[in-house]
Each structure stands twice: as structure tokens, then as C-alpha cells.
Image (cartoon, grey):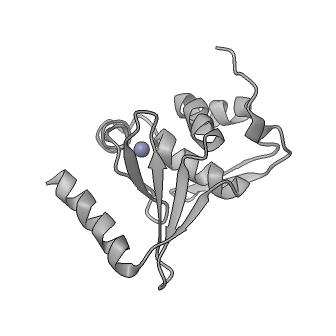
Amino acid sequence: MTLRPMSCVDKRLKVQISIFNIHVVTYPCTSRRLKFIFGPCAVPALDLVDQRSVTRLRSPSGRILYQVLGSSGKLYTCYSSCHFCTCPAFGFSVLQKNESLLCKHILAVYLSRAMGACQELSVSEEQLANILLAEEEDEG
Ligand SMILES: [Zn+2]
């Protein structure tokens, strides 16, 4: 597979990601290294970063969650504090099959944070609660 050049990985950049107490550091953060470490998630995650698809929602009390606009146009909620994404791929590949450590959305969140590429959005506590409740309704 050939990797096309990515604008966001041309910079010398250190990315440190902790997943279940495993520290992953790539320096410089090249798409080839990310693909070696994270497998097929790496390139789609970099595409999401390039498209500025990651938004960090922050409430006045300091609660933070991330929303990632997926390639299908659907919005997924990611919790970096507990390493969870609401997408079907996370449920299947990570939780059920135990085939991978993460989905492209969670990786896009980690990369966007490291690169300072998150969109920022302030929300009220009520708005944040509504987002979390909507996720719960989707599951039920
Ligand atoms: Zn996901």
C-alpha cells in the first residue's frame, strides 16, 4: 500500500498516546510509523485530522468530550479519558473481537490533540448532558 503525503504529518511532531498503560511515542510522527503501530486505522484517522473532523466540547465545569464527524457523515462521541468511541467499529473490532486497540475516531482524537488540530466548542452542562443522553437512547 502506498501512503500519500499528509499535510499534518510533515511537521516534526511528537505524539504520545497511552492506551491501557502502554505508552506509544512516535517522533517524528510519520504516517508510515503510525500505520506500523496502529494498522489500518492510521490512514483514515489522519484523513479525519486533515479534514478537521475532531471537535472538543468543554463544559463550564471542565468536563470534556470529543465528537468526530465520520467519513459517512455520522457524528461519533469519543471519551478519551476512558478510551471509548460510540461507533460500530469500536464495538465490534475492539470490544467484541479484541482485534485492535482503537478505531479511527479515537486515534483521530489523540492525533488532533497532539497536533493542536481540534475544533473547540464550549457547551453548557445541559447541552453536554443532552449529548450523553442521546448516546444512551441510541444504544437502547
Ligand atoms: Zn470510532
Answer above or below: position of 1 versus 7.
above
In the image, residue 92 lies at what x, y percent?
A: 31, 37
**Quarter occupied by residue 31:** top right
Figure quadrant, ligand 1 = top left
Q: Nearer the viewer, residue 96 or 3?
A: 3
Name the residue: 54% across, 28% down: 40
Q: Residue furthest right?
A: 12
Residue located at (54% from left, 51% from top): 54
The C terminus lies in which quarter of the figure? Answer: bottom left
Q: Is residue 29 visible?
A: yes
x, y percent for residue 98: 37, 39
Q: How many marks?
A: 0
Which quarter of the figure is the N terminus placed in? top right
Who is closer to the viewer here, 119 or 62?
119
Q: Is residue 68 left or right of residue 12?
A: left
Residue 130 x %, y %: 29, 69
Q: Is residue 23 visible?
A: no
Q: Is residue 49 rendered to the left or right of residue 105?
A: right
Residue found farthest to the top: 1
5 w.r.t. 7: above or below: above
Q: Residue at x 72, y 22 (%)?
A: 4
- Residue 72 location (% of width, % of height): 40, 33
Q: Residue at x 22, y 60 (%)?
A: 136
Residue pushed farthest bottom?
Answer: 61
